Image: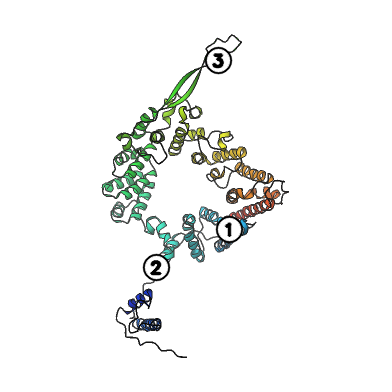
Amino acid sequence: MTRTSAPVDAPGADAWEGLVTTALLGTDRRTPPGAAPGPDAPLALLDAAAVETVRRRAGLRPARAAERPQAAPEDVRPALPPAAARRLAMLLADRPGPSGGGRRGAAPDLTELLPQWLALANARGFAPPPQVLPALLDAARGRTDLRPAALGFAGPRALWLARLNPDWRFALRAAPGGGAALPHLQDDDGVRRLWQEGLFAERVALLSALRSRTPAAARDLLASTWGTERAEDRLMFLDSLREGLGPDDEGFLEHALADRSRNVRATAAELLSALPGSALAARMAVRAEACVAIDHTRSARPSGTGGGIPGGATQTTVTIAVEAPHECDPGMERDGVVAKAPAGRGERSWWLGQLVEAAPLGTWSRRLGGRTPRDIVALPVADGWQGELHAAWCRAAVRQRDAAWSRALLGDPSAPEAGGPGAVSLAERAKLLGTLGAAERAEWVAGFIAAHGLSEAFQLLGVCAVPWAAPLGRAVVDALNIARDAGSYPWSFSGVMGLAERCLDPSEASRLDALLAVPDEPENASPGAGGYWAEAFQRLVTTLRLRAAMAEELGAA
């Protein structure tokens, strides 16, 4: 059967745009050119589009061929060993699938091994096979946490590919200066020209690179245009001074305390408070000392019935007394104290916390009778101010990277209060642990797990160096084994088990073989818990052995 359609008029120059508009609106609202309203209008629209498509193609004038892209840059790093290249292809080809019933099974999760593989490859300085670069960039596109390691491994060819494929443009944004080449840092004219004329990303990259080499030169470059920069740009530029922060930066930062932007003033004050010898730190110390002092309180004690102890004997109790500020004066605001308290916070406690946080921690030994940080933290604090005072000291210890104060605030990992709510929360403990060395950090967390189990340890495990030190690894495995034998809900420990797969030393695999059998379930155990635990330990052992194989493959030349 043949069909007839309405005649199609010869379209004009803008005919294609008109046809697109008609298609978007619908032929019941707009009739195609040369067609009558009715059921034949859609057919007329399609015929007109077909004619116009042929006309547009036939009328295309030959144009000069586009320039061929420049050759991909050379990657001078050594090539991956063949076994490692095959392993990378396997990791990139893996796609996580849905798991039934919430159970992960006994097979390793290869997607979680890719970050570790990249870290090992980057540490050994290998270059990727060119054929895997598209898959590597696709993986990094879907996982922002993977991008730094993936782009570092992909090397200069990642930027070359990103300029050819819009899907990979994130690589240009992630590269310093958007992938633009920075001038040699000894080229004063080139540096100044880029600083004055470059894009924002290029200027940030330039300032960061210069700051890492010559902190004073970076600060002088920033000062040269400070007054003409936008507030949001000033904030980003100021943040770059964290690298190499020192006493010579104090003058510039003091000037920034008078900035028009509150955020810029707050950042300048934070940086100055990280310099214990700065004038701002001294001002904050004076204010904080006025709020915190030793209180020697004498209280009556009943006399005994024997021993010749006279009646009316007294006992002296040493406490810390706190008198929070009654106002936030202009000087405090200029030094970075935020006057308006967040919802749910009292103004006076809010001001007190900011003052104590910004005061040098060396202030308190002098103010509180020459006591050590551990002695100071052990003193009772009157009138319910202990939580606020200790939290401020925690923030100060993290900001000033003071290990002695961090140890005092962390306390003994086996102390009863370490396992639950106390003066120092688990989140604060995790930050304090970050100021300690890797070995000391692992030892403290291992002691915490041995005393309190794994239910509160997830945050603390996240700040420990990978692979976990032997004492920490043993503490985690022992705690998992205890939980299994007690018939605990196995899925409650899935997060810790996942961490163990990524963080346990692979050499621990042989020690775990005894845990692979399905245990006898206690009477009060969760149904099926034994099978789940056996699967989880099987997956853990298999993953550890796979990680060992990965390291061996990358270590082979």
Estimate how packed mark 1 is, as few (under 14), some (14 to 19) or many (20 or more) residues with alpha carbons within 10 Å: some
> Tag 3's secondary structure?
loop
Q: Which residue is mark 3?
A: 302
Give the residue at x 64% y 45%.
Answer: 480
Q: Looking at the picture, how far across and down is residue 324, in whole percent?
A: 39, 30
* Residue 110 image label: 1
Chosen colour scheme: rainbow
Quadrant hosting residue 389:
top left
Looking at the image, tell me whether mark 2 or mark 3 is earlier in sequence order.
2
Which label belongs to residue 70?
2
User: Which label sits in the foreground, 1 or 2?
Assistant: 1
Tell me which corner region of the image, top left, top right, bottom left or bottom right, holds residue 393. Answer: top left
Q: Nearer the viewer, residue 276 or 152?
A: 276
Residue at 37%, 58% (x, y): give it. 181
State which tag comes first along the sequence, 1 or 2. Answer: 2
464 over 163 or under it: above or below? above
Residue 300 visible in the shown view: yes
